[in-house]
Image: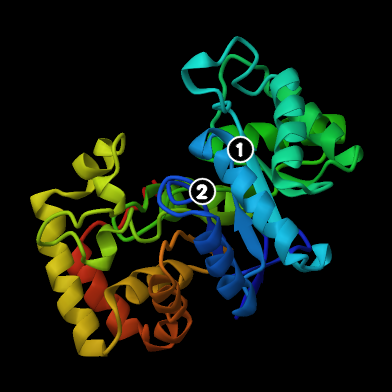
Amino acid sequence: MDYRRLGRSGLQVSVLSFGSWVTFHKQIDDSIADELMGIAYDQGINFFDNAETYALGESEKMMGRVLKKKKWDRTSYIVSSKAFFGWRGKDNKPNQTGLSRKHLFEACHEALQRLQVEYLDLYFCHRPDTTVPIEEVVWTMHNLIQQGKILYWGTSQWSAAEIMEAHRVAQQYGLIAPVMEQPQYNMFERFKMEQDYLPVFQNVGLGTTIWSPLAAGFLTGKYIDGIPEGSRLDIKGFDWLKERWLQEEKIKKLKKLVALAEKLGVSMASLAIAWTIKNPNVSTAILGATKKEQLYDNLKALDTLKVLSSDVMEKIEKILQNKPILDLA
């Protein structure tokens, strides 16, 4: 396993990590979660990603049960949570969502209880909240670090301008600035990582824990001939993923990518993941496997990375034809 610094922090994260969105509680039970996290840890993965809203809190509870059972040295792994959406779904009351000091503070304590840990290594603002002053958000995260509840704070799905505003406030008041962002990044979703965040990477540094490197499984190639039963796109309530990925133009490109993967002698999944971590601005790519065979295949991305020569990357670009155009005028 390779490790990268999380932005300009001292923290080292495995270049592949393991997440629980969609999968924990919805697709897998405790025994499978235990097996998959065990394989991930044994293969050198040290970061396990979660959030208050995943399966309305049940995902964190499941991960907490596994962590307690595993009895791994707490210094050997990194665990995260995210706050914004709350965990009560339709029953959320005012202050049980968003980025107010009250919700960020309480969501942190609830995550600690569910995950059965004494502190969170990473704590994310799961979305920007325009109804809350950015000063309140930065002060709250700074205070949680000072209290020893969290070690690093960051954002998810924020724009470059919003991240830089948080840095401005941190600088103005001598507070701890956000260290990382969790954006979506894959062969078909490139704008934030390859254009919007470039000034942030250059000016203040930014670690990235990218999600959906396989585009909800689309980039494995398994949806080319329809939706397999029990797969992510087959789950009730995730129709938006179908609409986003099962488009004729994307399927045409995917077929060409699958052919290229076959020529290279690698799986389509490992090619797609390797392509994301080829970007040096990616600190870690979060895997969401539901079966051990999938996880082992995903982990082969480290080997596939070695075959991604400039020639191969050029071939991929010719297929995708979606590289963000940098306007330097």
What residue type is disc 2 on?
Tyr
Render colour scheme: rainbow
Q: Residue at x 57, y 72 (%)?
A: 40
Snapshot quadrant of residue 290:
bottom left
Q: Quadrant of the N terminus?
A: bottom right
Secondary structure of the residue carrying numbered label 1? helix
Residue 326 against residue 100 in the figure, above or below = below
C-alpha distance separating marks 1 and 2: 9 Å
Residue, far top: 94
Marks 1/2 in contact by CB < 8 Å: the verdict is yes
Q: Which label number is shown at residue 197?
A: 2
Secondary structure of the residue carrying numbered label 2? loop
Q: Residue at x 77, y 33 (%)?
A: 109
In this view, the residue in front, 66 or 18, is: 66
Percent x, y for residue 217?
Answer: 31, 59
Q: On the picture, is 197 further left or further right than 110?
A: left
Residue 61 against residue 276 in the figure, above or below = above
Percent x, y for residue 292?
Answer: 44, 72
Residue 1 against residue 192 in the figure, above or below = below
Q: Residue at x 36, y 53 (%)?
A: 190
Residue where numbered disc 1 is placed: 163
Q: Residue at x 41, y 54 (%)?
A: 212
**Is residue 67 in sight in this rendering?**
yes
Q: On the picture, is 27 further left or further right than 76?
A: left
**Is residue 205 in sight in this rendering?**
no
Of the residues under marks 1 and 2, which one precedes in the sequence?
A: 1
Q: Which label number is shown at residue 52?
A: none
